[in-house]
Amino acid sequence: MRRFFWGVLVGLIATIVGLVIIVLAIGRLAATKRPTIPANSALVLALEGNIPEANSVKIPIPFIQSPSTPAVRDLWASLREAAHDHRIKAIVLQPHGLLVGWGKLQEIHEELLDFKKSGKPVYAFLQGAGTKEYYLASAADRIYMSPDDILNVKGLLLEAMYFKNTLDKVGVNVQVDHVGKYKDAGDVFTRTDMSPETREVLNQVLDQLYGDFCFTVAQGRHKTADQIRSLVDSGPFLGTEAKANGLVDQLGYEDQVYSDLKKKVGVSDLNKTYMKSYYRAVPARGDRIAMIVGQGDIVRSEPNSGLGTTSVIASAALAKVIRQVRNDSSIKGVILRVDSPGGDSVASDDLLHELKLLSAAKPLVISMSDVAASGGYFISMTGDPIIAYPDTITGSIGVLYVKPNISNLYGKLGIGETTLMRGKFADIDSISSPLSDAEQQKLHQSIQATYKSFVSKVAAARRKTYDQIDAIAQGRVWMGTQARENGLIDQLGGLDSAVSLIRQRAKLAGTGETDLVVYPPKRSLFDILMGSSKEGMEEAVAERQIRQVLPGLPGQSLLQGGLLRVLPYRLSVH
């Protein structure tokens, strides 16, 4: 009986393993096969949620779809290809629930305008559209919305959360020290409201974003920026109001969009080709240019490998990728794509060191995305040209130290603790005791030294004096437009500008094609599952759920504490 049981068990395991191997093999084959694009196609851009710089997960399993929203690089390559692809007759834009920053919005908007230069139309169909969705739709030739829908355009809102009262109630005190009067990341722990410095900078951010929104929409809708400002004050809009005010062209349904589009392009039938299929069909050709993506908080530890984890830049992992690119002779040049609010001070310095070695070996250009601030700005200081969008959040040249003290929480919970130590500053990192005056002075010296190093490296990279950089540093956040005026970046633009410049620096033909190769490469589902602990995956899920409830929660690097080059606040302007 025992032998029979073991035989059945072994047979069952072998069957399961065999099925898994077959499924993965079929999935791998399906993933490598390019989709067939039918003639007379409308390329459908159903953009939703976040749009990452690079998709990090590859799932080669049938019936499990890859994310419907492509990465920024995929959009860039696909729209360039579609402009001269005779099978693609038009684009239908359907944005919904966008969570992207304003830098990426500017990138996609400009790509749509470039596509229109081909003479092919772009039609937009809006459903439950807000400000970001309408911003993209303003690039379209015609905008449609359902008659009973609402165009939820009513201006921009920025909300900041402060946790001091909450921490006081549970007996947690956070001690913060910083250099730079605008370096107020610790305010979320130590204040109950916005400081005058924060209010000054965030008003500047809103002015820039709102001004760009009004100007861009005005261009697309053939109005003046002042007319758009006046209209926004009347929002949100019912469908009839939106049409009467010239914000949309037609009230109707999705079938009407395609019916009108068929007449426009002169075909009797129009096939739908979704972007998630089309970008897999775009052939890789041209000169190989690496696009190294630095996305998320900068940390020293390895990232949690769980599915759905918050994206971080782990210095050791990215340094390995940088060395790989440096030693690859097939790579003609490199674009460093930064989308990071910064983080750990030492990790940032390690990455800058590796990037300087890369810069000495290959032509390099920095392309800033939504955010390249503090540590994200620091790692960009290789001395190479820097390109950012007008609405990129950058600068924030400053340093802070964050240390929680939970001794009062221990008291509330009835926990007693006895500490034994040797060395004057042995307990400087202890979370169960406050910093003494001597410890505060010791840490302040470290912060000042780190700030001086930060400013000095920026001054050297930007070819300015220490005093020139110090005057515009102080932890202050700048938008891309102001950063260029202050000499913190070199030019305004997106991926097209970065590709054009890197081709020039690499002495490649200006009219040649570019194969933009993303690093780090996608990981397989197998790699992720094998590299993830049960606890790590549970932690990732828990973090995502908490951030859905508390979107203003500080980033991972700030919660870890220590010496940081990190953006003062997490901005979500909607």
Image: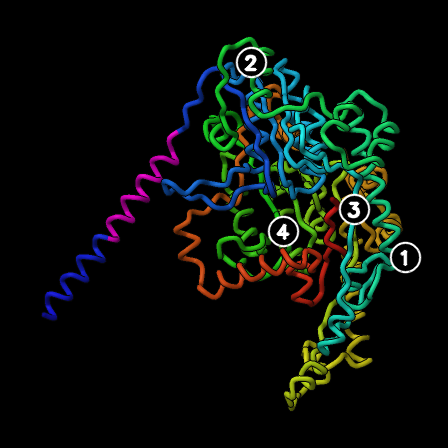
Q: Which mark is residue 262?
A: 2
Quadrant of the frame with the C terminus:
top right
Q: Which mark is residue 77?
A: none
Q: From what the image shows, is residue 290 above or below residue 496?
A: below
- Residue 359: where, in percent of width, then height? 63, 42
- Residue 299: where, in percent of width, then height? 61, 59
- Disc 1 is placed on an element classified as helix
Amino acid type, label 3 = Leu
Q: Residue at x 37, y 30 (%)?
A: 33
Question: What whole-number distance in Å separates the C-alpha atoms at marks 3 and 4?
Answer: 23 Å
Residue closest to the eye, 204 or 164: 164
Of mark 1 and mark 3, the one earlier in the sequence is 3
Disc 1 target residue: 196
Q: From what the image shows, is residue 84 above or below residue 386?
A: above
Of mark 2 and mark 1, the one earlier in the sequence is 1
Amino acid type, label 2 = Lys
Of mark 4 and mark 2, the one earlier in the sequence is 2
Q: What residue span does the magenta drawing correspond to?
A: 16-33
Question: What whole-number distance in Å separates the C-alpha atoms at marks 4 and 2?
Answer: 42 Å
Please say whether residue 300 is visible from this viewpoint.
yes
Q: From what the image shows, is residue 480 above or below residue 118?
A: below
Of mark 3 and mark 4, the one earlier in the sequence is 3
Amino acid type, label 1 = Pro
Give the residue furthest to the front: 148
- Disc 4 is placed on an element classified as loop
- Disc 3 is placed on an element classified as loop
Q: How is the image coloured?
A: rainbow
Where is residue 550, by image quadrant? bottom right
Disc 3 target residue: 157
